Image: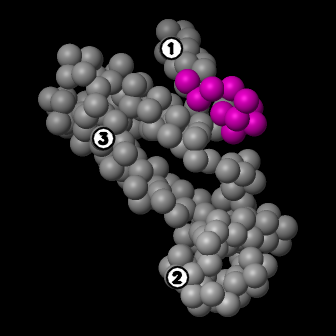
Amino acid sequence: MARWDPGAEQRLRKAALELYAEHGYDAVTVNQIAEHAGLTRRSYFRYFPDKREVLFAGSERLPAAVTEAIRAVDPSVAPWPAVLQTAVAIGELLADVAEDTDVRRAVIAASPELQERERTKLASVTAALRDGLEERGLPPENAALMAQVGSAVLQNAFSRWIDGGGKRTFRSCLDAVVESLRGELDN
């Protein structure tokens, strides 16, 4: 086998997702994933530190992307519109790179361990958003609240985007969530 196998990382992701969906996360081993991808266990660990991270690879770059997106918003824009502009930028970024999101979501929903990892990822997004709002001059308690709401809006919009099979734009999903939230807050 070649020392470097083009496409190996993507094959491992695909293999893991297929096996997790078919057998459940807990029932699948790294060896099975590697074998299903036509690779070795050693090759697996070149790309992922454990069997969980195959579903979350790249998520460590998300907080930096959030920070960059909120810094890119014109400083004269009020906090809530700045949060929404940031959510659009991040949601569109995720929509561009997301694959098999419905299957991934189902696999995560079936595993408490993966749910916890997903919550950790979302918490890092919320923290980056909060820090960005504080940089924009918002008091810490207000920045925390806005970041939490903004993160929930982003998560709900992405869920709607997944539910729609990626056929709607992320922006339209976000707009629908914001409109729904406004309607409920006004009641």
Question: Can residue 178 be seen by looking at this rendering?
Answer: yes
Is 9 on the left-hand or right-hand side of 23?
A: left
Mark closer to the observer (2, 1): 2
Q: Circle 3 sits in a helix, a strand or a loop, which is it? A: helix
Please name the amino acid that badge 1 sits on.
Arg
Residue linked to disc 2: 46
Label 3 Cα neighbours within 10 Å, binned few <14 / some 14-19 / many ≥20? some
Q: Residue furthest right?
A: 22
Callout 3 amino acid: Glu
As shown in the figure, which amino acid type bears the numbered disc 2? Arg
Earlier-in-chain disc, 2 versus 1: 2
Q: Residue at x 75, y 82 (%)?
A: 38
- Mark 3–mark 1 contact, CB under 8 Å? no
Separation of disc 3 and disc 2 at Cα? Answer: 29 Å
* Residue 68, numbered label: 3
Judged left or right of residue 55, residue 131 is left
**Quarter of the image holding residue 79?**
top left
Q: Which residues are magenta?
A: 161-171
